[in-house]
Image (cartoon, rainbow, N blue to C red):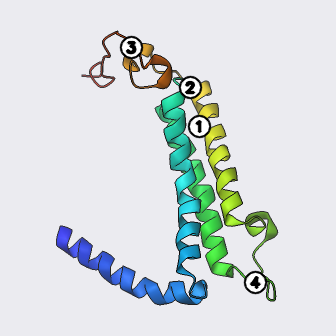
């Protein structure tokens, strides 16, 4: 099954190359950067919050990722469907979605994911400190013994 999956991914990658060249006018670096700016910021936001904010919990992280990835995918699919356009031939993409450069959009996406993560984490039950010793910045120097969160469920 693993070999078939790798073979399938290889075929998809080869078929994808002409589509990238047509949709991005051969500018592969812009294509790669735009993909990472649509999908990376939610992951980075949740990671940074998990390290520096002990109040973040599983529900907040999950919904922060889901909302952020949905926002990024909406922008990515819309932009690739309408094209990026140029100064001489602007794109017909709706301004509410594509009106901001993709690198600026990644900043908006990062902070939007942070807000969702923090908001949902504050509305749900926090993780007790006994499970967070030496896992987040505030409790990094704790000498207490950390109890695995899964140990209580067994």
Labelled pair 1, 2 in contact (Cβ < 8 Å) = no
- Read off the residue under disc 1: 117
| Left-right relation of 15 to 116 | left
Sequence order check: which comes first, mark 1 or mark 3?
1
Question: For this rendering, which residue is in front, 113 or 145?
Answer: 145
Task: Quote the CA–CA distance across marks 4 and 2.
Answer: 46 Å
Q: Quadrant of residue 22?
A: bottom right
Q: Residue 147: x percent and y percent? A: 30, 17
| Left-right relation of 148 to 28 | left
**Mark 3 neighbour class, 10 Å CA radius: few under 14, some 14 to 19, many 20 or more:** some
Q: Is residue 107 above or below residue 75?
A: above
Sequence order check: which comes first, mark 4 or mark 3?
4
| Residue depicted at 48% across the width and 90% down the height | 18
Residue 119 appearing in the image:
yes
Task: Quote the CA–CA distance across marks 1 and 2.
Answer: 11 Å
Sequence order check: which comes first, mark 4 or mark 1?
4
Q: Quadrant of the N terminus?
A: bottom left
Q: Residue 93: x percent and y percent? A: 75, 75
**Mark 1 neighbour class, 10 Å CA radius: few under 14, some 14 to 19, many 20 or more:** many
Sequence order check: which comes first, mark 1 or mark 2?
1
- Read off the residue under disc 3: 130
| Residue depicted at 53% across the width and 80% down the height | 28
Question: For this rendering, which residue is in front, 94 or 110?
Answer: 110
Q: Which mark is residue 86?
A: 4
Sequence order check: which comes first, mark 4 or mark 2?
4
Q: Is residue 138 above or below residue 114?
A: above
Task: Quote the CA–CA distance across marks 4 and 1.
Answer: 36 Å
Q: Quadrant of residue 30?
A: bottom right
Labelled pair 1, 3 in contact (Cβ < 8 Å) = no
Kind of element beneath mark 2: loop
| Left-right relation of 60 to 140 | right
Task: Quote the CA–CA distance across marks 4 and 3.
Answer: 55 Å
């Amino acid at each position: 099954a693993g070999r078939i999956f790798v073979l399938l991914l290889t075929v998809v990658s080869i078929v994808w190359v002409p589509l990238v060249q047509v949709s991005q006018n051969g500018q592969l670096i812009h294509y790669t950067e735009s993909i990472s700016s649509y999908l990376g910021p939610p992951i980075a936001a949740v990671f940074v919050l998990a390290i520096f904010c002990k109040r973040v919990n599983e529900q907040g992280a999950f919904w922060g990722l889901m909302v952020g990835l949905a926002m990024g995918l909406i922008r990515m699919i819309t932009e690739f469907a309408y094209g990026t356009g140029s100064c001489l031939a602007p794109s017909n993409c709706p301004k509410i979605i594509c009106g901001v450069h993709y690198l600026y959009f990644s900043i908006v996406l990062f902070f939007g994911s942070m807000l969702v993560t923090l908001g949902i984490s504050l509305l749900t039950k926090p993780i007790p400190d006994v499970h967070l010793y030496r896992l987040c910045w505030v409790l990094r120097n704790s000498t207490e013994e950390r109890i695995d969160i899964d140990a209580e469920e067994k």
